[in-house]
Amino acid sequence: MRNIVVLFVLAIAYSAVRYIVFAPKNLPHLPVLVVNKGVSMAAAFCFALAFWQQWRRLRGATGGTEPAAWFRAGIFGAIWHIPMSLAILRPGYFKEFFVTDGSRMSFNGEAVFMFGALTAGGVYLLTRQQWTPIQRWWLSIATIAVLFSHTLCMGIARGLNINASHAYLPPMWLLSVVGIAMGMGFLLMSRPKAPADDTPKLLTD
């Protein structure tokens, strides 16, 4: 539990430093916009860490936070992130997601939310118990792939923006993409040997 709390605190602190310390004008947006960025990055890393710990368990490791605990923390982060994102979904906050006159979302903006919704659906399905180990593995791949797409589309829309007003720090979407890619790598190395083997199911209690 401590590791999970530390991750969320660090992610939100990173967001505050990047968006407020050198741009105090963003301070009024701390409760939702800034916190939301930290929460979304923390949630992405929770899912990636769940797959990393699952890979470690399959190799015989016993220490560290359980994969299921990381996965539940990712769900918590997603539940926290989604309504905050919807509450501020307007051109004033995310002009990159809308056409020039702000009358509707752009193709890339719609892609961000389509892949986000697919990620939420995949996470929900992963909480169900009816899957065989190999089915759960394939579903996990699909879910982390759409999460990667969701984050990458957001990055394409927003750009790098590494400048003084952002404390010269890498954007959070880029850090999330790197973390998700690493999680996918560990997941790909964790394929169950056979549908009927005794390998523990991925990301279950």
Image: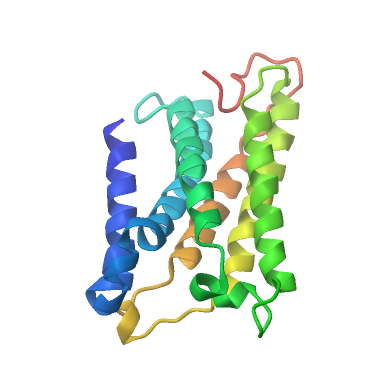
User: Is 11 on the left or on the right of 76, as rendered?
Assistant: left
Q: Position of residue 182 (x, y in %)?
A: 53, 52
User: Is 119 on the left or on the right of 161, as rendered?
Assistant: right
Q: Is residue 145 visible?
A: no
Q: Position of residue 153 (x, y in %)?
A: 64, 67
Quadrant of the rendered image containing residue 101: bottom right
User: Is 108 on the left or on the right of 175, as rendered?
Assistant: right
Query: In percent of the image, x 47 and y 31: which residue is there?
Result: 72
Q: Quadrant of the N terminus?
A: top left
Query: In percent of the image, x 47 and y 24: which residue is there?
Result: 60
Query: In percent of the image, x 72 and y 17: which residue is there?
Result: 130
Which of 195/204 is in front? 204
- Image height of 102 relative to 1, above or below: below
Q: Position of residue 84 (x, y in %)?
A: 47, 52
Q: Is residue 107 visible?
A: yes
- Image height of 136 relative to 82, above or below: above
Which of 31/17 is in front? 31
Q: Position of residue 190 (x, y in %)?
A: 61, 35
